[in-house]
Amino acid sequence: MASKLYVKLREYIGDTFSEIHLISSGPDDLILMNVTILEVSSNFMLVSQPGSGGSGEIMVPLSNVVAIME
C-alpha cells in the first residue's frame, strides 16, 4: 500500500516549489530552493534545481523530507 506522502508527491511531479526542507543524520539540515519534482518512487524523489547556481538533479530520500513550500 502506498504511503500518503508518496501519493501526494506523485501529484506534484513537474511542479516547481520555492523550498523543500530536509533533515539529515548529521548536525546540519538542508533547504533546497526553487526545485522541480521530476520523479517519485516509494523511497526517493528526484528533484531538479536548474540555473547557473543550481545543483542540477538531486536524489532525495523521502524519509528526510520535512516540509515542502509552494
Image: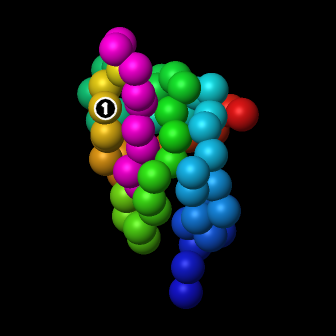
- Quarter occupied by the N terminus: bottom right
Q: Nearer the viewer, residue 13 or 3?
A: 13
**Element at label 1:** strand
Seen in the picture, residue 2 relative to 31 is either above or below; the reply is: below
Instruction: Give how far across and how far down residue 17 sits, in percent.
Output: 62, 34
7 horizontally vs 39: left or right: right
Q: Position of residue 47 (x, y in %)?
A: 42, 43
User: Which residue corresponds to mark 1?
Assistant: 56
Circle 1 residues within 10 Å: few <14, some 14–19, many ≥20? few
**Compared to 7, does 60 lie above or below?**
above
Q: Is residue 30 visible?
A: no
Kind of residue at badge 1: Gly
The total number of labels drawn is: 1
**Residue in view at x 58 percent, y 72 percent:** 3
Relative height, residue 11 to residue 24 (above, below): below
Residue at the (34%, 14%) spot, across then down: 52
Foreground residue among 22 and 46 = 46
Q: Is residue 46 magenta?
A: yes
Q: Dividing the image into 4 quarters, which one contains the C terminus?
A: top right
Residue 55 percent coordinates (x, y):
31, 25
Toward which corner of the image does residue 54 lie, by quadrant? top left
Residue 31 in view here: yes
The answer to whether residue 52 is left or right of residue 68 is: left
| Residue name at image x 31 percent, y 40 percent | 58
Q: Residue furthest bottom?
A: 1
Q: Residue at x 42, y 30 (%)?
A: 49
Q: Is residue 61 above or below residue 68?
A: below
24 drawn magenta: no
Magenta highlight range: 45-53
In the orientation shown, which residue stands out farthest toward the left?
26
* Colour style of the rendered protein structure: rainbow
Q: Nearer the viewer, residue 6 or 55?
A: 55
